[in-house]
Amino acid sequence: MLNNSLKCDDHWFKRDHIKQDLKRKSLQSAINKVTANSFSFMFSIASTMVLARLLTPKDFGLLAMVTAVTEFARSFRELGLGTLTVQREEINHAQVSTLFWINVSIGILIMLLLITISPLLVWFYSERRLLNICIVLSSIFFISGLTVQHRALLERQMKFGSLGVITIISYLGGFCVAIYLALHGYGVWTLVASEVLSALLFALGTWLFCRWLPGPPQKKTDMKASLQFGSDVSLFEIIQYFSRNIDRMLIGRFYGANSLGLYAKGFQLAMMPIEQIRMVFWDIGFSPLSTLQSDADRFRSFYSRFTSIMSFIYMPIVVFLVIKSESVILLLLGANWKSAAPILRIIALGGFFRPVVATFQLIMVSCGRTRRYVKWGMINSLIMIISFALGILWGPIGIAYAFAIASFISLLGAFLYCLKDTPVSAPLIFQNIKIPFLASWGAGLVVVLLPANIYPTGILLQIITLVFLLFLSYAGILLCIPKGRQQFLEFWSYGKELFVKA
């Protein structure tokens, strides 16, 4: 019986079939991932629009005070072992079973640790309500520990359609509960309950779609190299935590929950599309690039197309956030949040190249250069921390400018450091991103120069008109540039090929 079970599970570990027709599999994965993330993005936007009107900035600030700590704990949650399962060219049932139990143990330890330190959080912020919030949110880490390897196996097999369904259901469940609780006056507990329920639904979904059952941990399994890889990835996340969260900790400590709520919402809206696209392309690119890590020519070819498509999609979106930040705030959050508009604009500008830099990190991990990955994390975090320490003197706006300046400094450092001893070079990346870059900012300039009286009244109609004009200008500029026209037609052919074969 056990042998039969192992044979049934074996297909979760082999992926020779992925190399066959890799282009189409990647395109299909991209369609599935983008569709799922689009729905998730719409739920997030809808949730933001509703909850911003039902809750106060202080409610969001209270949650941000706790998540500054839980984000640090999140760095330890996987210990890089989910990434390892996707990256390894060869892996087996015994190894993944051992990794599963390691992840569960880590989840339990983090949960207990957060419960233990919750009184310190109350002391640091002088806010008693944080105690119970931290204790309840700690349960997410135990739940997540049960899902790491199942999610990784789905990613290893590029089953992003299944992962998409799971993600949509978990977001929808959390969204519905949040609206119900907010309408009944539960305040910050609205946000807490939504987070916990979404994690629980995601865990149930991964086990339903990935019917792999872990065996007992194997002491004789050689895990030294695996744990080294995982610890490097986890160490990178731990280091990055400080650069991602010290801004919120400083604002919360010196300027209070209200200022932190405004900053957190401005930051969230600016980074939401950037992070969505970054995560989509990381997920759909990681398994194929890991599969091709021993074939430099195919690796380069895949990465080149991958980066071109990513830049083509995300750059005009970020330009829109930069030039029309106040309109976005008024539509999504309302007039009470108008002070967050400058923060949104500055953060969006600073995050403009973030998806591109993320592909450098993707290259290092998929090629097994995790030591360099960790060192880069240290360099990047040091730049961010120094910038935030100076920026806090000017409050939330100073922190936003510090983020933008540090992001551009890190971009230059990434080109100089991250690509060494990899199949990809800086000139190749410039070649892939220059056309979308020029076209997106050119389209933004066209929209800014258009007279204000051509826009309809009403913020929603104005946003729709602005988006239409921006993308019309963007497509027009692309088609006027020979290489841009070639790129546009190539992307069109990808979609046509995909649907014809489907």
Image (cartoon, rainbow, N blue to C red):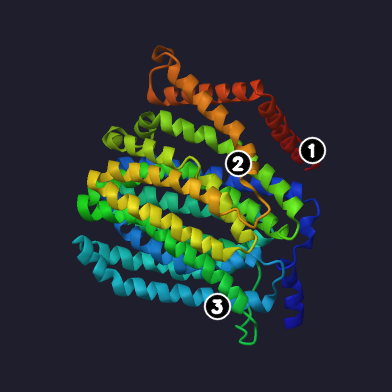
Residue 139: give x, y in percent of width and height: 40, 68
From the viewer's perspective, tell me whether residue 501 is left or right of residue 76.
right
Q: Amino acid at mark 3?
A: Trp
Q: Amino acid at mark 1?
A: Val
Q: Nearer the viewer, mark 3 or mark 2?
A: 2
Look at the picture and state if 486 lies above or below 8. above
Q: Nearer the viewer, mark 1 or mark 2?
A: 2
Q: Quadrant of residue 93?
A: bottom right
* Foreground of the two, 412 or 26: 412
Q: Earlier in the sequence, mark 3 or mark 2?
A: 3
Measuring 63% from the left and 56% from the top, which residue is drawn there?
286
Classify 10 Å Cα crowding around label 1: few (below 14), some (14-19), many (20 and above). Answer: few
Measuring 50% from the left and 67% from the top, which residue is drawn there?
234
- The residue beneath circle 2 is 310
Classify 10 Å Cα crowding around label 3: few (below 14), some (14-19), many (20 and above). Answer: some
- The residue beneath circle 3 is 101
Secondary element type, mark 2: helix
Q: Quadrant of the C terminus?
A: top right
Q: CA distance from mark 1 to mark 2?
A: 22 Å
Q: CA distance from mark 3 to mark 1?
A: 43 Å
Residue 413: give x, y in percent of width and height: 49, 50
- The residue beneath circle 1 is 500
Look at the picture and state if 172 lies above or below 329. below
Is residue 146 at all visible to an observer of this figure?
A: no
Secondary element type, mark 1: helix
Q: Earlier in the sequence, mark 3 or mark 1?
A: 3
Measuring 53% from the left and 35% from the top, which residue is drawn there?
315
Q: CA distance from mark 3 to mark 2?
A: 36 Å
Q: Quadrant of residue 207?
A: bottom right
Measuring 70% from the left and 55% from the top, which residue is drawn there?
288
Q: Quadrant of the N terminus?
A: bottom right
* Foreground of the two, 459 or 16: 16
